[in-house]
Amino acid sequence: MSGVLEVSSEWLALREAEDARARSLPLAEAAAALLPPGPVTVHDLGSGTGSMARWLAPLLPGPQTWVLHDWNADLTAHAQRGDAPRDRHGSAVALRSSVEPLEQLTAAHLAAGSLVTASALLDVLTAGEAHAIVDACVAARVPALLSLSVTGDVELQPRDPRDRRIATAFNHHQRREVEGRRLLGPYAGRIVEGLFSLAGWNVRRALTTWRLSDRDPRLLTEWFDGWVEAAEQQDPRLLDEASGYRELRHAQLRRGEFSAVVYHLDLLAWPR
């Protein structure tokens, strides 16, 4: 997975506050209730700059150690700079990193783990990578809290006839093949839910949303432009109409008239 679908630390920083607002707090609280007494070790997959640790660590008891798993060593290094997250009791969390392709994840990597987490990861995985993660969790009997997998559903206001065509092309783009890797895209959350269920695990789901508006115009603009650009890449026939569509939406945003709801799926899975 190394070198594929890289994201910038700037984009991760821009979306962090909305990610934190959107994630399912009830599922996080349920995950906390599953933890046995004593020290907590959390394995965060596709950890990026550590936003999941900053959000979740204060909801969990301590002492905590977070193992940041990512294929991008620069991002894990970024996550370990600055102040460490704090646990529920106000104590600093220990951070360490593990740089490896996620398709090579095994139960041995999760040995003595208390919880596996991921955020905005599943939809950029392949079926093989998703199977590897589920198999590792099941073999190690470590619960998993997997947040913010896109479902492909968006609602834009005000509505426009071109919304559906752009959304359809974008969702096909999410399922594209990249350097031999066929992405799961909007099917990822339900596929992983099914894999855990087939393994005999309990699974809870929560539908979660980004709610974008002129409250954070930069995030809405970056998301919208990326959404349209991906649709254009998937279907170049959209290029002509997408130009006028983009101009209209930008004008609406400047007037405070444009908003978007982007739907995600959060999952909590644990052994019976």
Image (spheres, rainbow, N blue to C red):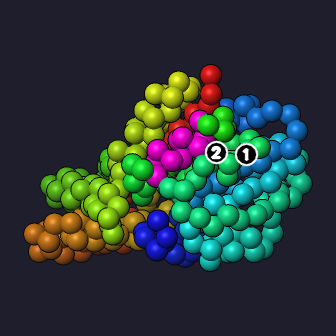
Residue 23 is at least partly visible in this image: no
User: What kind of element bears circle 1?
Assistant: loop
- Mark 2: few, some, or many residues within 10 Å (few <14, many ≥20)? some
Give the residue pinned by disc 2.
Answer: 107
User: How far from the left and from the top, in percent, is residue 152?
Assistant: 33, 49
Give the residue pinned by disc 1.
Answer: 111
Q: Which residues are magenta?
A: 129-138
Task: Give whichever of 259, 81 is nearer the camera.
Answer: 81
Within the magenta stretch, is there residue 136? yes
On the rendered structure, is 49 left or right of 200?
right
Seen in the picture, residue 189 relative to 247 is either above or below; the reply is: above
User: How far from the left and from the top, in percent, is residue 11?
Assistant: 51, 72
Residue at x-position 66% and y-position 34%: 141
Quarter of the figure with the C terminus: top right
Looking at the picture, which amino acid does disc 2 mark?
A: Ala
**Distance CA(mark 1)–CA(mark 2):** 6 Å
Residue at x-position 40% and y-position 38%: 190
Q: Which mark is residue 144?
A: none
Label 1 with label 2: CB-CB less than 8 Å: yes
Looking at the picture, which amino acid does disc 1 mark?
A: Ala
User: How far from the left and from the top, in percent, is residue 97?
Assistant: 71, 65
